[in-house]
Image: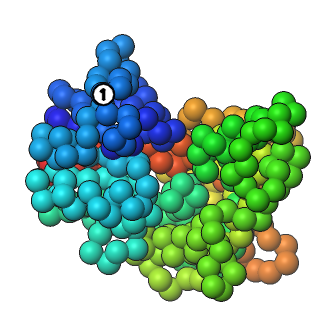
Amino acid sequence: MKVAVVGSTGMVGQVMLKVLEERNFPITELIPVASEKSVGNKVKYKQEEFTIVSMKDAIAAKPDIAIFSAGGGTSLEFAPLFAEAGTTVIDNSSAWRMDPDKKLVVPEINADVLTKEDKIIANPNCSTIQLVMVLGPLNKKYDLKRVIVSTYQSVTGTGKAAVDQLNGEIGGDESTAKVYPYQIFKNALPHCDVFADDDYTKEEIKLMKEPKKILGDDTFNLTATAVRVPVQGGHSESVNIEFENEFDLDEVRKILAETPGVVVMDNVKNNEYPMPLYSEGKDEVFVGRIRRDLSQPKTLNLWIVADNLRKGAATNAVQIAEYLVEKNLV
């Protein structure tokens, strides 16, 4: 299996290499790809060093799979060129997610939509992935009516420069470049990504649109507020879910506990609940604070946490690749 990792020097690209190694993905030839300024440099994989190549050379090598994490513009330009060469592209940017001709996939929820004809596959937004891991099984049982999600997103979702800003502010270094319009240390910014004309941010719009496509269900309503918090790794979400049908709390916990990739942490008597500190470096989606909304019927409150660089990005992409190999789709 010849695999290209596009954006291999970036924060997500580095985690992708780590996850590929941890999961022992069947790579016979690794092709690390990055920007022109990085060509010729080395990346480490399984204690070996591999030379970074240009996009043109990577396409010419005709890898079986190319996992992209290099930004939407790069994906729009180069993913079709890889696809034309016969490579199956798994793209982590927002470029293809809402394209009606491209599949948007969280393997535990909808991997069965994939076919050999899918040469560009979209990896969902990090916040979307952990949300649908919970919404998916509950929708099957109780039928979603309305979802309200408020996110508490870590700075790694913005990238290395944002981590540098947070750490610089913690250390009192005022010379650190500012990625955000305000300081992030000791603060919370109700501002993830850029604002659209309707005053929602692009992150909120992704959260409102992507779950419907993944679940193959546009009959429910969803609204979102996305907030950046001074946490280095791990996104958290407060979610309010109104169902068409009545539910039982013990059954909800059982359904979620039996969902692959979901871990229920819900014992408030012992202060057991999901936290980004606990999720960092793990691939599972953690859910807790499961309780009935006392203000209206058939409505549930819960709290979801996941490592946004792993299940929210790299791990989900690698799981898609694993599914393609397992089902002989590449």
Q: What type is the residue that disc 1 sits on?
A: Gly
Q: Is residue 11 above or below residue 70?
A: above
Question: What residue is rendered at 25% in x and 45% in y?
Answer: 55
Residue 165 place in picture, x, y as percent: 73, 42
Judge left or right: residue 245 versus residue 278. left
Specify whether 127 is left or right of 31.
right
Which of 321/227 is in front?
Answer: 227
> Which residue is tagged 1?
40
| Above-or-below relation of 242 to 20 | below
Residue 135 % position (x, y): 55, 65
Q: In the rendered image, which quarter is residue 3 located in? A: top left
Q: Nearer the viewer, residue 147 or 173?
A: 173
5 or 152: nearer the eye?
Answer: 5
Looking at the image, which residue is at 67% across and 45% down?
162
- Looking at the rendered structure, the secondary structure element under dot 1 is loop
Location of the N terminus by quadrant is top left
Residue 152 appears at what percent x and percent y? 73, 55
